[in-house]
Image (spheres, rainbow, N blue to C red):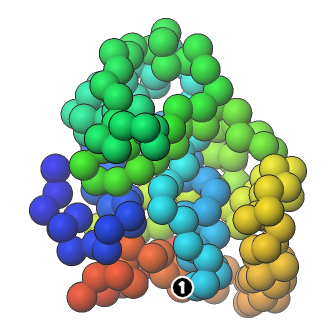
Amino acid sequence: MSASSDRLPPGIPDVPAVVEVLNRHGVRYVVIGGWVAQAYVESYVTEDVDFTPATDPDNLERLSAALTELGARIRTEAVPEGLPFAHDAVSLGRTKMWNLQCPLGAFDIAFEPAGGGYDYLAGHAHLVNVRGIEIPVADLADVIASKRLANRPKDQLVLPQLDQALTDRDKGPEGSPIRVEFPSDRARTTDPEVEK
């Protein structure tokens, strides 16, 4: 695990450290939801990160191995340290969503998020580099579409700002990089560059 997660405020997941484990195991996934939204709306805060993985058996086996290395447990308010659970490709694929936690923070595995799963999202995803770790993130337009479909109160509050961010992004010069700053970096004492 990463000692760097000790420098993050409580409740903020060390996303690059979690992703490093997923990447090392060869898991195919896209980061979706609030963590991506935070890069565009500074006032928006989420205390977990959502992953949408590919659902083929080989990828689910790699995901299971990564979850084991992370020490992932089922997240529940009743048991603050989380519930241990046994998993493999078959058991992971039996549900649409897992709410998990590990020493690096809280995260969700969403196989069928509103708006489309891995196969759809991966075609529009962008690679961002945070602390030297490449992270595939959903396109802002896909994040907006998903939040609009989910239509939760917290989504309704942030949608106008996300719509404006999308308008601003689309007005930019063709091919010009957009600086995306993720909250896990803003919280650090030394902020490395984040590139898109």
Where residue 135 sits, quadrant-wise, is bottom left
172 vs 184, nearest the viewer: 184
Classify residue 118 as left or right of residue 50: right
User: Looking at the image, which residue is at 69% across and 46% down?
Assistant: 121
In front of the other: 90 or 178: 90
Give 67 or 130, whichever is nearer the viewer.
Answer: 67
Asked which quadrant contains residue 83, the reply is top left
Q: 116 or 26, which lies in front?
A: 116
Up-down relation of residue 58 to residue 40 (above or below): above
Q: Residue 16 location in percent, x, y?
A: 34, 60
Residue under pointer 1:
179
Q: Is residue 195 visible?
A: no
Q: Which amino acid is tagged 1?
A: Arg
Q: How far across and down, in percent of the image, does residue 60 sit?
A: 46, 22
Q: Residue at x 31, y 86 (%)?
A: 191
Q: Is residue 15 above or below residue 102?
A: below
Left or right of 105: which side holds 170?
Answer: right
Residue 69 horizontal/vertical position (percent): 22, 33
Tag count in the figure?
Answer: 1
Tell me what residue is drawn at x 29 percent, y 41 percent. Answer: 81
